[in-house]
Amino acid sequence: MYKIMVTGGAGFIGSALVRYLIAKTPHKVANLDKLTYAGNLDSLSNAQLSSRYQFYRADICDAAALDRAFADFQPTVVMHLAAESHVDRSIDGPAEFITTNMVGTYVLLEAARRYWGSLDPARKELFRFHHVSTDEVYGDLEESDELFTESTPYAPSSPYSASKASSDHLVRAWHRTYGLPILLTNCSNNYGPYHFPEKLIPHIILNALAGKPLPVYGDGRQVRDWLYVEDHARALVEVVTRGKVGETYNIGGHNEKRNLEVVETICVLLDELQPRADGRSYKEQITFVKDRPGHDRRYAIDASKIERELGWKPQETFESGIRKTVQWYLDNRDWWERVLNGSYRLARLGDKA
């Protein structure tokens, strides 16, 4: 049994990881989250009932709070998911991304290094720092047929991806210079239940249900590899428990889709599962809008290393995953209505650090 500290465990991917760890493993879990706008404890309602779950409300930029949490929980593993992650927000206000993703990762690395250095030899040997990153650090594949591998050079395009690339470099440097036992993963676009409504798939679902325009950037031909979030959570646990120290593993869904195709698929599913009252297709709500600055054309992950070395591969196809996702939003109106009206932010109980 591990004692796993998850930073950003109230976010989209972090909460999926915490739910998986509590439901499917024997491990103890500490969720360390600042609870910014994207941190939602409603996403952890069942996990919070477990005796194996603890919550620390803390900012990864607060070294003293981190030291207290490390001393109290005594983790075997740190899984670092706390990050600002919305590209549009990074364009409008990059400072928060620099602070959280770069400075915060540095402060967390130093807290982890202090803690790791204090451990006895046996516990020191077991300790891992797992940094969770994105395929966006690799830049734009444009219209080529190439795939991102673990050795693809970094070429980030947005303030968000540049801040994540910087944090990746810090993690590798702390391994090379100080010997901190790290693991690093870069994933493709996640989707699934409990996704904050500013992101493409939930935004389209909720706009469609509200009868609003379904905005598509540019010509909608940007390609992304889509990874169901519960498949990602499984992969992260495989890496942190079985991965080789110092290695990077790319995690992808093997589901390349153009953005317009994603939007149209959602419309077709909603036409079937919750038809419009006027009998017309949700596709009529699609609206093309001005493209965002620096918008990368194509991302695509080569996930053969994690399959070859750890035996992981996604269980969901895009078709099965997107159907589950649309149905979840139809069945869980209370969750997303609380996000839209802001009442989810009142659920701030369980602070410890």
Image: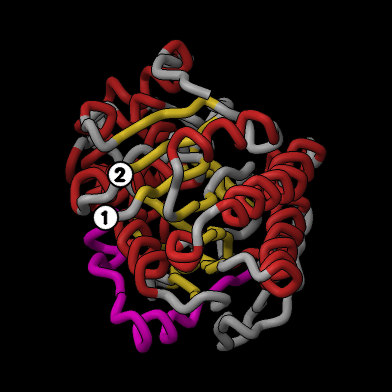
Residue 204: percent from left, percent from top: 44, 41
Residue 56 vs 298, above or below: the answer is above
Along the viewing direction, whichever of 7 and 289 lies nearer the viewer: 7
Give the quadrant of the N terminus: bottom left
Q: What secondary structure is found at the residue carrying circle 1?
A: loop
Residue 303: percent from left, percent from top: 44, 80
Q: What secondary structure is found at the residue carrying circle 2?
A: strand
Is 178 on the left-hand or right-hand side of 5?
Answer: right
Q: How is the image coloured?
A: secondary structure
Q: Residues within 10 Å of mark 1 (few under 14, many from 20)?
A: few
Residue at image location 76% in from the left, 45% down from the top: 103
Residue at image location 71% in from the left, 65% down from the top: 174
Along the viewing direction, whichever of 5 and 98 lies nearer the viewer: 5
Q: Is residue 262 magenta?
A: no
Is 29 on the left-hand or right-hand side of 148?
Answer: left
Kindly indicate the quadrant of the structure image that contains residue 277.
top left
Say what amino acid the circle numbered 2 marks: Lys
- Which numbered dot is residue 1? 1
Residue 309 visible: yes
Say what amino acid the circle numbered 1 marks: Met
Q: Are marks 1 and 2 in contact (CB under 8 Å)?
A: yes
Query: Which comes before the other along the chain, label 1 or label 2?
Result: 1
The range drawn in magenta is 297-322
Residue at image location 65% in from the left, 45% down from the top: 111
Q: Which residue is mark 2?
A: 28
Outermost residue toward the front in this view: 120
